[in-house]
C-alpha cells in the first residue's frame, strides 16, 4: 500500500466518470462526462448529444435508457443545446489529458472509461480496487469529488 501511495503522490493523475446510453450492441454514446485533475481545480464537465434519436433505438435499448433515467442517472436523453456530439468525447478527453499533463487516470468501474483510456493510450486504474469508501451517487461530479477527497487524504 505504501508503494501505491507514493506512486499516487509522485504522478499527475485525474479521475474520470462517464454516464452513457447503450445505442446498439456495439456502441455506447457518452452522455455525460466528468474528469477532475489531481490539483483539484482543473476539471472537465461536459454533456454530449447522442448519435441516434431515441425513437430510432431498438426497443430494448429504449427500455434500458428509461430504466437508467428513472433509477440511476436521472438524465434526459438529449442535453440542452449546444452540446457536442458523443463522438467528440474522445477528442475532449484527449485535450484535457494533454493540456494537464496527466500520467494516468483513475476511473470508476466502467468498461467505457477503461476502453476510452485504452484508445487514448493512457494508463488507467479502476478506483474501486483501491479500498476507498463508495460514493453513493450516480452524479459523476459528486462521485469523483468523493473519491478525490479520499485519494488526497491518503
Image: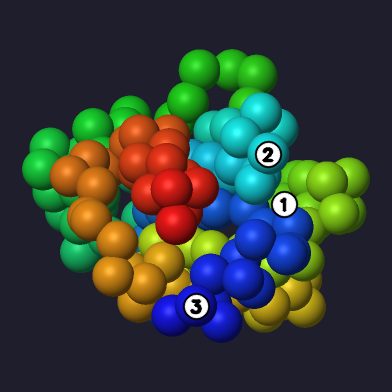
Residue at image coords 66%, 28%:
41
Do the numbered discs 1 and 2 sit on residues whose CB atoms are within 8 Å?
no
* Callout 3: SS: helix
Return the disc, 1 or 2, that comes first in the chain's sequence.
2
Disc 1 to disc 2, how far (Cα)? Answer: 17 Å
Residue wearing tag 2: 39
Can you tell which of label 3 and label 1 is closer to the viewer? 3
Q: State the quadrant of the N terminus.
A: bottom left
Disc 3 to disc 2, how far (Cα)? Answer: 21 Å
Residue at image coords 50%, 47%:
152
In the image, residue 49 lies at what x, y percent? 56, 37
Residue closer to the observer: 63 or 106: 106
* Callout 1: SS: helix
Label 2 Cα crowd, 10 Å radius (few <14 / some 14-19 / many 20+): few
Residue 93: mark in rendering: 1
In the image, taking residue 99 as reference, residue 143 lies left or right, namely left
In the image, residue 154 lies at what x, y percent? 44, 57
Residue closer to the observer: 95 or 32: 95
**Up-down relation of residue 9 to residue 69 (above or below):** below
Residue at image coords 72%, 51%:
93
Residue 137 seen in the current view: yes
Can you tell which of label 3 and label 2 is closer to the viewer? 3
Residue wearing tag 3: 2
In the image, residue 42 lies at what x, y percent? 70, 32
Return the disc, 3 or 2, that comes first in the chain's sequence.
3
Q: Quadrant of residue 144?
A: top left
Q: Quadrant of residue 129?
A: bottom left
In the image, residue 113 lies at what x, y percent? 52, 66
Residue closer to the observer: 40 or 23: 40
Amino acid at each position: 500500500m505504501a508503494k501505491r501511495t507514493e506512486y499516487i503522490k509522485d504522478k499527475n493523475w485525474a479521475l474520470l466518470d462517464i454516464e452513457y446510453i447503450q445505442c446498439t450492441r456495439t456502441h455506447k454514446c457518452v452522455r455525460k462526462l466528468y474528469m477532475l485533475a489531481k490539483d483539484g481545480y482543473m476539471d472537465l464537465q461536459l454533456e454530449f448529444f447522442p448519435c441516434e434519436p431515441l425513437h430510432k433505438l431498438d426497443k430494448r435499448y429504449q427500455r434500458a435508457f428509461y430504466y437508467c433515467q428513472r433509477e440511476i442517472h436521472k438524465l434526459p436523453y438529449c442535453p440542452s443545446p449546444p452540446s457536442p456530439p458523443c463522438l467528440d468525447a474522445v477528442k475532449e478527453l484527449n485535450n484535457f489529458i494533454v493540456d494537464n499533463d496527466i500520467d494516468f487516470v483513475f476511473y470508476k468501474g466502467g468498461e467505457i472509461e477503461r476502453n476510452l483510456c485504452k484508445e487514448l493510450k493512457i494508463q488507467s486504474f479502476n478506483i474501486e480496487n483501491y479500498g476507498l469508501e463508495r460514493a453513493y451517487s450516480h452524479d459523476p461530479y459528486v462521485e469523483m469529488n468523493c473519491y478525490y477527497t479520499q485519494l488526497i487524504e491518503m
